[in-house]
Image (cartoon, rainbow, N blue to C red):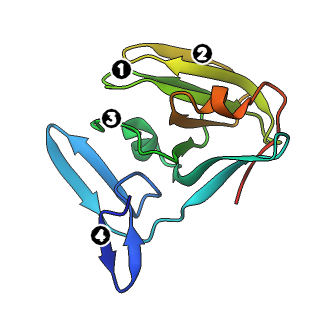
Amino acid sequence: MPCDIEDGKAYYPFSCSSRNFVAFVFGTIVRQKGRCNLMQVINQTRGCTLAEHGWFAENPFTRMVGLLGKRRFPEGGALILRPCSGIHMLGMRFAIDALYLDARGRVVRAVRSLAPWRIGPLDPTTECVIEMPAGTINASGTVEGDEITLS
């Protein structure tokens, strides 16, 4: 959900790039506003949309912050961590699903309902990890080997 509308453009409250992020640092919100490039996450193999509103975390700071401080994962949202070969749930308040993708966009690992305060698997063959609300993988039938695209 957009947090602001300026000049007819929506700005989103999650990490999209180094120019647009919300970070919770020592309880203080640090915010820099910019246009967010949202992506759809699509499972080409199954012909279904996994997320309508995917946002990127591509620099070390936005990848480190990720979903920390969030009370819930927005419905239809996804956090795309790139480059990334592993994730953690330290400090998180909710479970997530995670898809580990190789450089060709193929699912090499699908982690369902990774609980708060857990550490996800580390996979050196992974190019990026897509975090989504818990239940997304089961609802879509996504499995290892499926091709995922961003548009």
Residue sitting at x 38%, y 58%: 1
Q: Which residue is mark 4?
A: 4
Mark 3–mark 4 distance (CA, rounded to whole Å): 20 Å
The residue type indicated by label 1 comes to Leu
Which numbered disc, 2 or 3, marks the residue that appears first in the sequence? 3
Q: Which residue is mark 3?
A: 68
Percent position of residue 95, x then y:
43, 23
Local SS, label 4:
strand
Residue sitting at x 50%, y 18%: 114
> Do we see residue 59 in this rendering?
yes
Mark seen at residue 121 = 2
Q: Quadrant of residue 40?
A: bottom right
Which numbered disc, 1 or 4, marks the residue that appears first in the sequence? 4
Decide: few, some or many residues near mark 3? Use Cα within 10 Å; few <14, some 14-19, many ≥20. some
> Do we see residue 124 in this rendering?
no
Q: In the figure, 75 relative to 141: above or below? A: below
Q: Which residue is mark 1?
A: 90
Local SS, label 2:
strand
Residue sitting at x 30%, y 38%: 70
Percent position of residue 51, x then y:
59, 48
Mark 2–mark 3 distance (CA, rounded to whole Å): 19 Å
Percent position of residue 42, x then y:
72, 49
Local SS, label 3:
loop
Which numbered disc, 3 or 4, marks the residue that appears first in the sequence? 4
